[in-house]
Image (cartoon, rainbow, N blue to C red):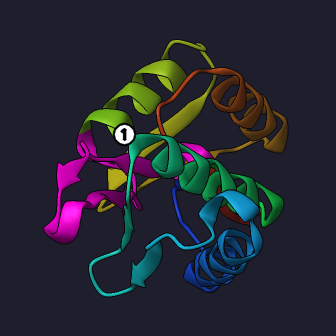
Amino acid sequence: MASFDIVSRVDFQEVDNAVNVARKTILTRYDFRQSKTEITLDKKEKKIHVGTEDEMKMRAVQEALVENLVRRKIDPKALEAKEMQPAAHGMIQREIAIKEGVDTETARTVVKLIKGLNLKVQAAIQDQQVRVSAKQIDDLQTVIKAVRGASIGIPLQFINMTR
C-alpha cells in the first residue's frame, strides 16, 4: 500500500538565518539610526522576541522579518504574533511564536476533507501528523492536490511517500 504523511515543520536554521539578516537590515536602515531595536530568537521555546521604540518601527521590523522568512521558503502562516506590550525604558515588545506540528483540530479538519473526497484512502491521525494510505498512487496525488487547495491555517508538507 502506498502512503505519505502530512506534517507541519519549520527549519529553525533558516529561521535563525532570516532573523540574523533582518537584524542586519534594521541596523543599516536610516529610520532606525539612534534607536534601540532588537530581535532575538529563542530556539528552545520556538519564539522570536522583538523590541523597539514605537509601533511604526515594530511594523517595519515585522515586515523585514517576514520578508526574509519568505525568501527562505518559510510560510508566514507558521508565525503567531502576540499583542504588543510595554517594556522598560519607553520601549514596546512583541513575542512571535513559531507553530510547528499539526494540532488535533487541524488534523480532524484534514481527515474530514480527505473523507469528503470519496476516494479509497485511509487517513489516520498519528501524534502531530496525518498518515494517508491507499492502494493507488493516483488517489494519493488527488488527496495532496485537494489538501493544498484547501485553506488550512498552517503550512503543510507532504513527506515519506512510499509505494
Measuring 39% from the left and 57% from the top, which residue is drawn there?
A: 99
The x and y percentages for residue 66 are 64, 53
Asked whether 57 or 7 is in front, the reply is 57
- Is residue 120 found inside the magenta-colored segment of the image? no
Measuring 40% from the left and 59% from the top, which residue is drawn there?
A: 101
In the rendered view, tell whether residue 158 sits above or below residue 15: above
In the rendered view, tell whether residue 90 sits above or below residue 106: below
**Quadrant of the rendering where the N terminus is positioned:** bottom right
Residue where numbered disc 1 is placed = 107
The x and y percentages for residue 52 are 40, 62
Residue 74 falls left or right of residue 118: right
- Which residues make up the magenta segment? 76-104
Asked whether 154 or 16 is in front, the reply is 16
- Is residue 79 found inside the magenta-colored segment of the image? yes
Measuring 24% from the left and 42% from the top, which residue is drawn there?
A: 83
Measuring 27% from the left and 46% from the top, which residue is drawn there?
A: 82
Q: How many marks?
A: 1
Check disc 1 and report its element: helix, strand or loop.
helix
Residue that extends furthest to the front in the rendered view of this protein: 34
Identify the amino acid type marked 1: Ala
Asked whether 6 or 45 is in front, the reply is 45
**Quadrant of the rendering where the C terminus is positioned:** bottom right
Residue 13 falls left or right of residue 43: right
Residue 159 falls left or right of residue 79: right
